[in-house]
């Protein structure tokens, strides 16, 4: 009984318990961020016209994020992939419904006598569009500087058309009325978009509102790939992953029991593996790391490595137990555990070194191609670090307390 109390008082055991409870609480409160391959959705790959610097890339992702939010897509993720690609993840919306929104620059210009008098930078606010018949109207307010520039260009030109372009395509050419050619600045402007039907006019007006609201992209873009996973298929992947994890746990339990035939060794190994799983998921929840299929593969690899390490610790101690020289010496068991940890740290360092290039490709060059496997590499590294610094020391302490005396 005293051994149990001493074991529970150990700072490593206390730290593990606190982290496991904290992880469970955080996961319960905030959930686990799932990848599209588990929850269903679409991935749109956008290629920029040319490689850009980080500031320009941030501008591109910000504009795209604003557009999709304005479109009403709630579950979106826009992220840079290298210096020329952008990955857009959406759920609950068909990709073709937002293709026009994310695939066009959204450049706005208003010209009088072929001279640009207004651009998207002059727009302050955009009001909800109105649709009358097959024609949509999008009112918006411009800056005073833009209004003054417009007033000077329009002064005395009653009846002259104002050509309004969106992405270099003429969308409307309203004629200057007498009221706006007096040279007095007017900040309220309206753009008219025609449609083939009322529904088409509503769509055109809504897209125009989004473009004017979000601003233009600094470079031309092109959609180069769209892939989708249905919610039903995502559920199948999730169920498949759970079944695979459960089967792996059963197989590991059987193998460990066959090898040692001592419940006091088998149960802690299984509990340690479960603790590692909780800590990995808790870490992913805290840092908002996506758990997708590559990440699940990483979790399985990390837990499998953890079981290997616990077997190494157990074998080293049992080997020391049979050694008559060390049988009466507690120092002998500590030496064996240190030797086991030397092997564990060496193996972990090798595995992390092998995973780092894969993770680097994903973070630096994007989550396309082989970069998708960065999720596997990063999750594996998290699992290994959790194991060697938190759970393995606790298992070693358990072995030292309860096995070394048998």
Image: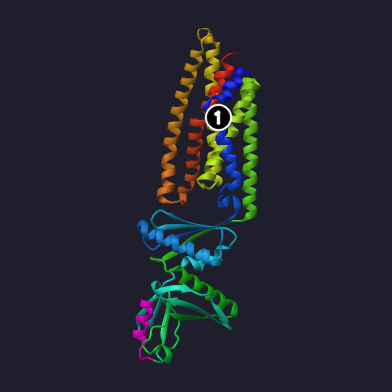
Q: Position of residue 374 (x, y in %)?
A: 47, 45
Range covered by the magenta-colored residues: 144-157
At which x and y percent is residue 303? Answer: 55, 34
| SS for callout 1 | helix
Position of the N terminus, as image quadrant, is: top right
In the image, 397 versus 218, the foreground residue is 397
Q: In which quarter of the image is residue 72?
A: bottom right
Q: Main secondary structure of the magenta part?
A: helix
Which is more toward the observer, 140 or 132? 140
Nearest the camera: 371 or 86? 86
Q: Can residue 294 be seen in this view?
A: no
Residue 95 falls in image quadrant: bottom right
Question: Around disc 1, counting alpha carbons within 10 Å, would you say few (fewer than 14), some (14 to 19), or many (20 or more)?
Answer: some
Q: In which quarter of the image is the C terminus?
A: top right
Q: Look at 45% across and 77% down and name the residue there.
A: 141
Q: Which residue is drawn at 38% across and 77% down?
A: 144
**The quarter of the displayed image where residue 244 is located:** top right
Q: Name the residue under label 1.
A: 14
Q: Position of residue 48 (x, y in %)?
A: 40, 61
For the residue pair 209 and 94, the one nearer the viewer reads as 209
Find out whether residue 49 is within the magenta segment: no
Count of labels in the image: 1
Residue 176, relative to residue 14: is it above or below?
below
- Image position, residue 334 (x, y; %): 49, 17
Asked if one can make out residue 243 in the rendered structure from this viewpoint, the answer is yes
């Amino acid at each position: 009984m005293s051994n149990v109390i001493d074991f529970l008082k150990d700072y490593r055991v206390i730290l593990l318990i606190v982290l496991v409870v904290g992880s469970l609480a955080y996961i319960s409160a905030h959930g686990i961020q799932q990848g599209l391959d588990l929850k269903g959705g679409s991935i749109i790959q956008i290629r920029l016209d040319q490689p850009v610097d980080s500031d320009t890339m941030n501008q591109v992702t910000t504009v795209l994020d604003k557009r999709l939010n304005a479109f009403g897509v709630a579950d979106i993720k826009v992220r840079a992939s290298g210096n020329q690609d952008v990955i857009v993840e959406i759920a609950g919306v068909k990709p073709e419904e937002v293709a026009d929104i994310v695939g066009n620059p959204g450049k706005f210009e208003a010209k009088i006598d072929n001279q640009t008098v207004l651009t998207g930078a002059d727009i302050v606010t955009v009001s909800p569009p109105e649709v009358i018949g097959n024609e949509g109207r999008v009112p918006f307010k411009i800056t005073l500087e833009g209004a003054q520039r417009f007033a000077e260009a329009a002064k005395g030109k009653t009846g002259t058309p104002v050509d309004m372009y969106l992405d270099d395509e003429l969308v409307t050419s309203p004629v200057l009325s007498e009221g706006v050619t007096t040279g007095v600045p007017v900040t309220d402007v309206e753009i008219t978009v025609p449609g083939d039907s009322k529904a088409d006019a509503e769509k055109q007006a809504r897209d125009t509102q989004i473009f004017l609201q979000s601003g233009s992209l600094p470079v031309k873009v092109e959609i180069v790939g769209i892939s989708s996973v249905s919610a039903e298929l995502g559920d199948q992947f999730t169920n498949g992953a759970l079944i695979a994890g459960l089967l792996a746990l059963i197989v590991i339990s059987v193998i460990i029991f066959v090898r040692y035939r001592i419940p006091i060794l088998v149960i802690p190994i299984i509990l340690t593996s479960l603790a590692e799983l909780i800590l990995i998921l808790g870490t992913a929840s805290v840092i908002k790391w996506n758990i997708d299929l590559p990440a699940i593969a990483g979790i399985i690899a990390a837990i499998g490595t953890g079981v290997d390490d616990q077997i190494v610790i157990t074998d080293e101690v049992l080997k020391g137990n049979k050694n008559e020289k060390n049988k009466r010496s507690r120092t002998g068991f500590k030496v064996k555990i240190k030797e086991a940890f030397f092997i564990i740290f060496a193996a972990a360092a090798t595995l992390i070194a092998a995973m780092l290039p894969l993770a680097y490709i994903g973070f630096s060059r994007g989550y396309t191609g082989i970069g998708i496997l960065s999720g596997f590499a990063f999750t594996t590294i998290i699992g290994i670090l959790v194991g060697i610094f938190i759970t393995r020391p606790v298992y070693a302490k358990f072995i030292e307390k309860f096995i070394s005396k048998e």
